[in-house]
Image (tube, grey):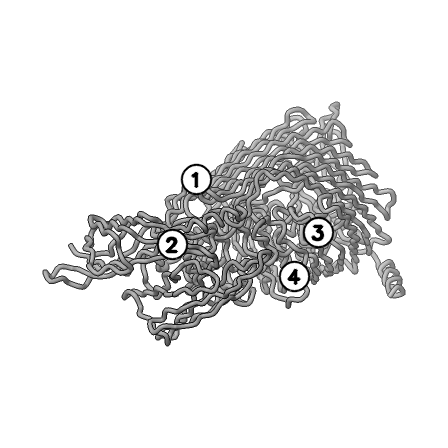
Amino acid sequence: MTTIRYLIVLLTFCACGDFYDPNELGKTQILGIRSVPPIVRPGHSAELSVLIVDSQGTIALTSENVTWNVTNSPPLIKQALGTITTINDDGSAVYQAPDNIGTAQDPSIATIIEVSITLPNDLTLTALKTILFAPVDDNENPVITRLVIGDTDIDMPSLKIENPVELSKHENTPLEAFVDDHIPQQIDAFLDTLPEALCPMKHAPDFAWYTNVGSIDFFRTPMPMFIPPDPETIAERDNNNRPSTQGHLYLVYRVVYCNLFSSLTWTEIPITLHE
Amino acid sequence: MRFFFIVLVFVLETTSAYAESISISGTVLDSQTFIPIQNATIQIEEQTTITDAIGHYVITTQHNTLSQAKDTTDKLVLMISAEGYLNTQKNLAPIKQSNIVILLDKQGQSGEIIEIIEKTPIQITTPGQTDLSQKELLTIPGARGDPISALRSLPSVGTTRSGRGAGQGNIVIRGSAPEDSSYLVDGIRIPLLYHFGGITSVIPSNFIEDIVFFPGGFGANEGSSTAGLVEIQTKSSQITQTSGFFEFSFIDVAAYLETPITKTLDLKIGLRRSIIDLILPFVIPEDAGLDFVVAPRYYDGQLRLDWRPHSNHRFAFFGFLSSDRLELLFNNQRSNDPKAMGAVVSQPNFQKLMATWSYKNSVIDNRLVAAGGPTYIFFELGEDFGLDIAAWDYTLRDDLTWKFHDLLSLKTGLNIRWILSTSSVNLPLPSSTEDPGNPPNLSFDLPVDIQDQEQITSIYANYAALDITPSKFFQITPSVRLEYYAQLNRFELMPRLSTKMTLSQQWIIRGSTGVYTRAPENAEALNTTLHPERSNQYVIGVEYNPTSDIKATLNGFYIDRSQLVQQDDTRIDISNPIASDVYVNTGSGHSYGFESLLRARYDNFFGWLAYTISRSEIRISDDQPLELYRYDQTHNLIAVASYQIGPWTLGGRWQYATGIPITPYIGSRYNADLNYYTPIIGDVNSERIEDSHRLDMRIDYSWRFDSWDLSAFLDVTNVYLNPAVLSYQYNFDYTEKTPITDIPILPALGIRGTF
């Protein structure tokens, strides 16, 4: 029976619908939730923000259309612990962890944060993020240190790069990212104590590239390929009356711990396609 | 109630006999040269005829009978004489029979005189049991000449959830799960019934003498099934001359040879290989995101020796093998499961060797079978995931029928089965049985990690059945089966009962009831604390035969299921996610409905209209409400017709079926840590996929030459391009869906040369 069910899954793989691929940003999507710091000390707080985009680019949020809740997800995360104390004007929030996260025999190691975003068309998107509790000293999100986009080399990119990167509308462009993972040593040591079945891979990098012009092959790898749209579909013109268009690349980078929670960063890169 | 029973029997006993018109046809040949004998005299009762120039005869007699034709106590005596040859005679069952080949020895010669090439038709013992003739099996449109595929045209057989993609278990019988039914070859279970779940069956037609289909209510001689039974009986008839064929179609190529080696020993050998794997790579769209490394490739082979050293003893050695392989390369990265890419390999293989000894005289009929062989299931997803199972399956069974009185016969037997298996699995658990919404995620779900786990599974069974025929109008068979499931350390006692009442020449009533169990299989078998799944079946049917060529049946059935194995995901131990821990016996449910069959058989026409209405429900535990079972199908209507005129045979098959239940997705949540979406599941099986209907057509043409025949066929599945929806595929956030459909049209053109 097990084999049969996997063959059914295989059948599902074989049938390819004509859907938007998520890297093409054809619809409104949440790309990530960032917690600063990513691991929360008991009794401390963390600032939470969400990156949401659509075909036009990043969507600015307000406190009016974002709700934050604390919830659980059994069997591993059994309780909703802590509270959301503040929701800022830009939709970001402050989470306050409880002082006590359980006994030594039955520790509650994490909780779940749920964010719901209501869009003008009454569509509601929901996303979940796991918050890990641990008393760690070195505790930062990863950092994207360098990007290579075709011939353009960008050192130390920030969350948002100001100057557009120029790409050919006729050629595929290789993309490459370099990162600093900032994996806390104390967390690393803690994960070593877990059974392998629970944590088959202590931490793994996860790249995810997106664009609202064209598409990206192997978008969940560190070295994907940007595929420009068909030039015939580009109606806009630049100052020299040549077909040209503008858009964005997004890179969301995570360090995923034990297939459970992640530390995360992102960057937004404006691009221009021309001859 | 007892009083009524006695009175009813009395009334039936006093009914007068009636006359029935019975037609017998065949050929008379010289036993040494096989030359047809012209002007041989054939006599049955008061009727006489002679053979024509090619030794062919047809004789019809009015036979007085008190019972239905298949009653074995009633015989016709066929007497044959020809100038220069020894006279002979043969007892035949008083039913319409064709292809009775008679071999006559010249005077002064000795040896075997007569052989029945086409055996007596199967005796119908339970309501809904169906037998199909060779001609019907081979020419049903849409089956491409595959006899086992023809089962899909019978009442009580539903269309399947996964179309032709579900391996052995793609026959849904009376709303039961496919794995609840058993598939037997000469009484021995086989691991796979079809190549790639339905392209064609693993046993080609040349080796099949009969396929007996029990949708339920079968006797105690078979077990380990809580639903239906498909019994494939291989061909054991004596070979009198060397013959064979070579066949080529767009699906496969096949060759077959049968030949006598000595007068008591003959050989059959067959080989078949797919060629669809050579065609598919050219018809898959380039944008489908997959490349065939090895397109669906299968082959099978069979070798059979039959030895008849004595008129009472027969020995048969039958070896067969089946090998499938499919290798795909998924180039597109799936957003919700980025590790699910790369090569996907599916490779189920098995081999089986069977040795049979049959002893038969007028009182005793005994059959001993020893069988064994390996089964290999290899499945790989990418570089890291897959399962690899090797199982050696040995069976020893003996079936004895002792007819110790005209009114009584005893059937008893034993069946011992050992399975020695080694399993390695590295896959996440499939979604739970009744919550199919969450597909297993290779990237993020915890995998079940089993390495080289050895397991011995054994089942010991004994049964006894007493056929009681107090009158020719009434037959009752109480029986009991005892099974011991060693790995569960549990005995199961299964009483069963079947009855048959012949009200008149036209009307027969049949009923059966019984208890049926089956042991957990595959991953479920790892949990040795489980109980066998169980069903209580109740079936009653009426049969109406207005003429000898037309038959109508109506059956009602109720199946009460309990101890169904369910997957309880809340029991997953995240620190030790072994599959066995999540299986529990909490499920229960039932199926009920009616099935009807109106069937006509003439010399140049056969056809039927089959309709089933049913409902199948399940509850995953006692505190949960009844839900539609995923195999529920309200309506299933099938019309089949085939007409032969000269060398042409034209047939059609049309089917309408209610869509099967599905569980809808009503939204999704984004996991921002792992970057994938999980669907929000709606009410389980609360919606259905679209109803389906399709037309299959087949045309055959035959040429006859001096020493060989040539035939060609065109069999087109889904003539008017209306592919059935099998399931749905969803976009990355489960807000859009598109149907996954069956093959839009499948034309199969074939040609066969027979010598």
Q: Chain of mark 3?
A: B
**In this rendering, the label closer to the viewer, 2 or 1:** 2
Vertical order, B595 against B349 (above or below): below
Q: Please say whether residue B221 is visible from this viewpoint.
A: no
- Is B740 situated left or right of B306 in this image? left
Q: Are marks 3 and 2 on the same chain?
A: no
Q: Chain of mark 4?
A: B
Which residue occupies the foreground of this view, B45 or B12? Answer: B12
**In this rendering, the label closer to the viewer, 4 or 2:** 2
- Is A195 situated left or right of A92 in this image? right
The residue beneath circle 3 is B532
The residue beneath circle 4 is B595
Q: Residues within 10 Å of mark 2 (few under 14, many from 20)?
A: many
Query: SS of the residue at dot 1?
Result: strand
Q: Chain of mark 2?
A: A
Pointers 3 and 4 in contact (C-beta within 8 Å): no
Query: SS of the residue at dot 3?
Result: loop
Whole-percent x and y of residue B307?
70, 28
**In this rendering, the label closer to the viewer, 1 or 3:** 3
- Distance between the Cα atoms at labels 2 and 1? 36 Å
Which quadrant: the C terminus of chain B? top right
| Residue type at the position of mark 4 | Glu
